[in-house]
Amino acid sequence: MLTDQIRRHSTEVFGRLVYIRREIHKYPELGFNEFKTSGLIRSFLEELGLDVSGFAKTGLAATITGKPDGKTVAIRADIDALPIKEENTFEFASRNVGKMHACGHDGHTAIVLGAAYVLSRLKDFLNGSVKLIFQPAEEGLGGAEVMINEGVLDNPKVDAIIGTHVSPLINTGFISVRKGPVMAEPTEFEITIIGKSGHGAQPENAINPITIGALVVEKFKGIVKTSSDPLKRAVLTVTCFNAGNASNIIPDSVSIRGTIRTFDKEIRTFITDSMEEVLKEETQKAGAAYKFKANNGYPPVINDDNLVDKFIDSSEKIIDSKNIITSQEPSMLAEDFSYYSRLVPGTYFHLGCRSQMCNEVINLHNSKFNLDENCIKTGVELMSQFALDYLKY
């Protein structure tokens, strides 16, 4: 039975994957500069006898070719770290000061390397090909788009793609997957309110941008409406409010920054238009001026319904069906996996990485984040089973 062979091969490579994951964790690298990481990946893939191609400066791709004339399914990992100073003290904690794998991409890389190992040994059972994609610069730089522009979905042409993200909110051995919207589109905004500086003791002779900014932020709270439709959900959050540097001087300007998260273009437009209306109204009343800029980020991640069904069927061969969570709400986080899944059918799932022995939840992007390495084996088996099953259809 193929599932038994998947389990056997994933067990035999598990120790090697843990070693590689820890090496990557020890030497984290930021987007488009993952040279050591890329070298480790290339060495492992070439050891398997695969031809490796370079993309996007530090990205890599390799194809396991089974029976000819079949479809091609892609398995994607992101490989970059974050500009965070790690506070963990274990032996493989970051040695690159100010950089850390605080988002689990070291685990993602190990999982796809493990799938490469398993599927290379089972390639006689592949009714088609599996393309392995190791992508740089997911963290805000859009490495996926660069990979695509350089042809990573071609030669052979990819028919479907799968990706995962570890989740410390879910126990190891569990996964979360849903049809439709999975992760939101981010829009980052910057606002400058321009008033008139003056003495703090004579506010009547100044136009205080802080007062105007406070009113603007308060009115922003009423723009986003709640909705039961996942595609209509939205978030508007102010994250920065900077002004002045002296207790007796009214500054001449205020800088406000934040993020909007949406799944729907019309809702995003409604929110930014409404924000500008608030800004215009409040600055005109006070005799001030404003500048407003909103920059759209990654598209939303939308899962293909049919592919999700196939993935769930495959997952039930690896883990108990009770460990498959399908009711979770879409996340307002963002992921550039969306660049792939808007071009070919895709499914993106969350892989539990919290040890059941751990009482405290340390979330992603935290300086003390660490994953339960047992999740790597689960991820390898899920990816391998799905690739084999998808190519049967």
Image (cartoon, rainbow, N blue to C red):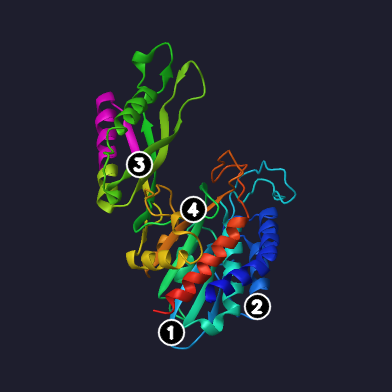
In depth, the one of 269 and 93 nearer the eye is: 93
The span picked out in magenta is: 273-292
In depth, the one of 35 and 91 nearer the eye is: 91
The residue at the point 28 percent across, 26 percent down is 287
Give the number of marks: 4
Q: Which mark is residue 252?
A: none
The secondary element bearing badge 1 is classed as loop
| Mark 4, residue position | 140
Q: CA distance from mark 3 to mark 1?
A: 42 Å
The relative height of residue 276 versus residue 300 in the rendered view (above or below) is: above
The relative height of residue 328 versus residue 343 in the rendered view (above or below) is: above
Is residue 187 among the parts visible in the rendering? yes
Residue 282 among those drawn in magenta: yes
User: Which mark's residue is nearer the viewer, 3 or 2?
Assistant: 2
The disc, 3 or 2, on the residue closer to the chain's N-terminal end is 2
Across and down, in percent, residue 392 comes to: 42, 79
The disc, 4 or 1, on the residue closer to the chain's N-terminal end is 1
Q: Find the residue positioned furthest to the top.
A: 201
Q: Quadrant of residue 37?
A: bottom right
Residue 354 among those drawn in magenta: no
| Mark 2, residue position | 48
| Mark 3, residue position | 235
The disc, 1 or 2, on the residue closer to the chain's N-terminal end is 2
